[in-house]
Image (cartoon, helix red, strand yellow):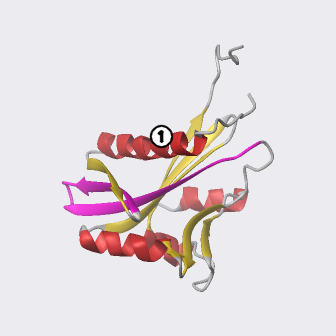
Amino acid sequence: MDIVKSTRHQKIIGNFRESFICNWLSRSGFEVALIDHTGLDIVAYNPSNKKRLGITVKSRTRFAGQESSSVNILSNRKNKNDRGKLLDACKSFACDPWIGIYVEASTFADLFLTSLKNYDAKYRRKKNLKIDAWKMTKYDLYRYDKDKNVMHIIINFSINNWKPIH
């Protein structure tokens, strides 16, 4: 089924990605709250190890043929310093900074969750780039799946009886 975005698609997908991550963290024993704070979307507390995560979440919808396009996750520009905002918010809330990435295509979606520390150590290309990206090539997906510090959920969309309403 082809993707046809509504005018509110970015808002809708944004709400979905955050709730989806909250659901999986909650199912994993975390206490979770959606928050509306600059640089931060979710605060999650793991009672078993007493760790608090501050998570910024990015999402993209990919049309056919664009599934391997990277996702811009953090801007490092002076006027839009996403990394600095995340770090500042995590300091205020005493959290470890994490990133969540939700990427959907017409027949499947991927959800990734990893610490900023892990991203920086293994996947960040250069420190002086204006944009940090989450790569989606086959090679990168293989690397993420082999990394025990990258949580990954694959969702396959199986459409039974969903047709455009006329």
- Magenta: main secondary structure: strand
Helix, strand or loop at disc 1? helix
Indicate whether 74 appears above or below 138. below
Residue 48 on image: x %, y %: 19, 55
Picture mark count: 1
Residue at the spot 76% in from the left edge and 50% down from the top edge: 66
Residue at the spot 68% in from the left edge and 15% down from the top edge: 165
In the picture as drawn, the residue positioned furthest to the right comes out as: 65
Residue 142 on image: x %, y %: 64, 58
Indicate whether 72 appears above or below 132. above
Q: Quadrant of the C terminus?
A: top right
Residue 107 on image: x %, y %: 68, 34
* Residue 116 included in the magenta stretch of the image: no
Q: Quadrant of the N terminus?
A: top right
* Residues shaded magenta: 40-63
Residue 7 on image: x %, y %: 63, 39
**Which of the 4 image quadrants contains residue 94?**
bottom left
Determine which residue is flagged by label 1. Answer: 16
The foreground one among 63 and 52 is: 63
| 10 Å crowding of disc 1: few (<14), some (14-19), many (20+) | some
Residue at the spot 65% in from the left edge and 13% down from the top edge: 161
* Residue 50 included in the magenta stretch of the image: yes
